[in-house]
Image (cartoon, rainbow, N blue to C red):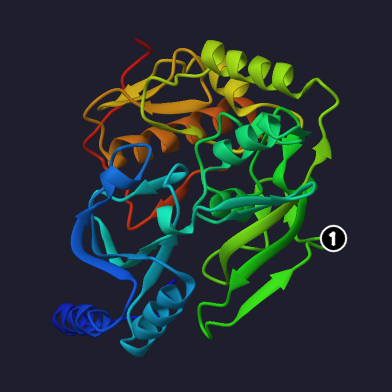
Amino acid sequence: MHIGGGIEEDEMQDQFSAFCKLCECLEGCVVRQNIPMAQYTSFRTGGCARVLVEPQNVEALRNALAVAQECNIPFEVIGNGTNLLVSDDGVEAVVFRIGDAFASIRRTGGIFFAEAGAPLSLLAKRSVEQGFMGLEWAAGIPGSIGGAVAMNAGAYGGEIATLLQSVSWMDPKTGAIAETIPHDGAFSYRYSAFRAPECIVLSAAFSLQSDDGSARTRMAEYAEKRREKQPLSYPSAGSTFKRPEGNFAGALIEQCGLKGMRIGGAQISTLHAGFLINTGGATSSDIYELMGQVQKVVYEKKGVLLEPEVHLLGSFALSTQKKGGGAK
């Protein structure tokens, strides 16, 4: 979320310094400066966040957000970073990371309550272990509950929206907390109304059905499919592009002969063309430029403009220096 604009570098530095100093007085906030974001993203790329804040509770999050606005500086909110590409130049903002401090999972009857930082895969596995079904498709998805709700995550015909009973979220401008029952129009394919910067997901309640005896088998089958068809041994953000209506991004990319194409350390996976992977030493610019090449070629050959599923954080610009390599 960007507040203000046109601020000179010296003034911006003063504001970041003021933010950090004020946050020293807050309880429950871990505040660090110039933190490499590669360690917080599944692509394992990206420059430094000017400031990284890891609130340890809801009140700390509310207070730190208020300080950011008081200091008139931009901020962003991330979870596990599994659907995120951070610029090599870093992020000139305060980055709030909703992580392990927001990771509890509990159950009342068939309703599972999970905080935003809890792994979606853990919720899926725990629900099956406790005799419920509905989330088997999510057992191999590495994102957090907050990110899954924000993007309406899904796979193998399942999606978050069909299971949600309610969402607890914070208005970052006021610090107010609301609990909302999802309504028609709140969700669509890889989209939800519960997205930063308008709101920050704190937790969600999921209504699941009792297992009819097939959940464990189904979860194991999905896991086997992932092992066979996805490049799980390489850093990636999962499916790089959204599924175009009536087609599949990976199929279109493969039909265009792009499987295996490389730019720097970034490659279109030879196992699944819908995945862009870091083969080692890739930069975010490599990945971004490869995404652009894929979009260009698929549009030229198939007339379909692929929409990224990966969220970009920071500034990106196409380089005129690098050229893509062929399939290898």
Mark 1: amino acid:
Asp
Q: Residue at x 51, y 83 (%)?
A: 173
Q: Quadrant of the C terminus?
A: top left
Work out whether residue 4 can be spotted: no
Q: Foreground residue, 158 or 30? A: 30
Q: Secondary structure at mark 1?
A: loop
Residue 230, image x and y in percent?
A: 51, 19
Q: Is residue 197 above or below residue 242?
A: below
Residue 50, image x and y in percent?
A: 23, 65
Residue 311, image x and y in percent?
A: 47, 50
Residue 51, image x and y in percent?
A: 25, 67
Which quadrant would residue 13 be assigned to in this image? bottom left
Q: Quadrant of the N terminus?
A: bottom left
Which quadrant would residue 247 be assigned to in this image? top right
Which residue matches tag 1?
A: 184
Q: Is residue 322 left or right of residue 203?
A: left
Q: Foreground residue, 42 or 306? A: 42
Which quadrant would residue 9 be assigned to in this image? bottom left
Q: Residue at x 44, y 69 (%)?
A: 57
